[in-house]
Each structure stands twice: as structure tokens, then as C-alpha cells.
Amino acid sequence: MMNIKTTRWDSAEHLKTDEDIQLYLEACMEEAGDDPSFIVHALGVIARARNMSQLARDTGLTREGLYKALSPDGNPTFLTVAKVAKALGLQITVQTVAR
């Protein structure tokens, strides 16, 4: 029997450019369906890719608070999500969908 060594996948390690981040977030939005925690998790991954310490300075929130809010168990306010998105250079938009 052959032993297989695995390593934990971390999407943040693969988000190098603005285009990478945009494509990742678009895929997450599509995958999320009605699960807002999926989007919050995606923002957390992007935040780790960009530099959580700098994000904390840019948002006025603590690093620990950001990690907690953007964790799988986090439940951030919309204000926190909006601050994080803006600090990451992202814009939250709403559009109508065909019915």
C-alpha cells in the first residue's frame, strides 16, 4: 500500500492579482446561492491574500475582530462587510434579475 501525503488547500495562496480576486469572488457569488456566509468566507480568503493587518488598519477594525467576523462562524454586520469590501478595493452592487 502506498502512502499519500496531502497538504491543506488554501485559496488565498492563489489570489495574486486583482483579476484572480475578481474571478474568485464571481465564482463564489455564483456558488453561494442563498448562503451569505459563503460570501463572507470568500471575503475572508481575499483578506488573507491581501494582508489582514493592512486591512485592519484600513477598516479601523482589529485583526482579531476581522478574523472572527470573516470566519465560517462569523456573522458580521453589513457595515463590516461594506468596510471590508471597500478596503479591499471591491464595490458592492445590486442588480435586478430576470423573473
Image (cartoon, rainbow, N blue to C red):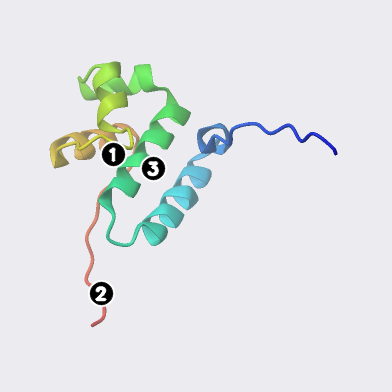
Q: Which mark is residue 71?
A: none
Instruction: Give the left or right position of residue 81, taking residue 54 as reference.
Output: left
First-in-chain label (2 vs 1)? 1
Instruction: Give the left or right position of residue 39, taking residue 22 as reference.
Output: left
- Against 79, residue 31 (above or below) is below
Q: Return the x and y of residue 66 as percentages of the image width and height.
A: 27, 25
Q: In whole angstroms, how far apart are the C-alphas of marks 2 and 1?
A: 22 Å
Per the image, label 2 sits on a secondary structure element best described as loop
Q: Quadrant of residue 72?
A: top left
Quadrant location, the N terminus: top right
- Against 88, residue 42 (above or below) is below
Seen at 25% across and 74% down, the residue is 97
User: How many residues crowd mark 1 within 10 Å: few (<14), some (14–19), many (20+)?
Assistant: some
First-in-chain label (2 vs 3)? 3
User: How many residues crowd mark 3 within 10 Å: few (<14), some (14–19), many (20+)?
Assistant: many
Q: In whole angstroms, how far apart are the C-alphas of marks 2 and 3?
A: 22 Å
| Residue at image mark 3 | 42
Seen at 39% across and 42% down, the residue is 42
Q: Return the x and y of residue 16 as percentages of the image width and height.
A: 55, 35
Q: Which residue sits furthest front?
A: 1
Quadrant location, the C terminus: bottom left
| Residue 57 seen by the camera | no
Residue sitting nearer the eye, 6 or 15: 6
Q: Amino acid at mark 3?
A: Ala
Instruction: Give the left or right position of residue 74, taking residue 12 as reference.
Output: left
Mark 2 and mark 1 residues within 8 Å of each other at the beta carbon:
no
Q: Which mark is residue 85?
A: 1
Q: Quadrant of residue 65?
A: top left
Per the image, label 3 sits on a secondary structure element best described as helix
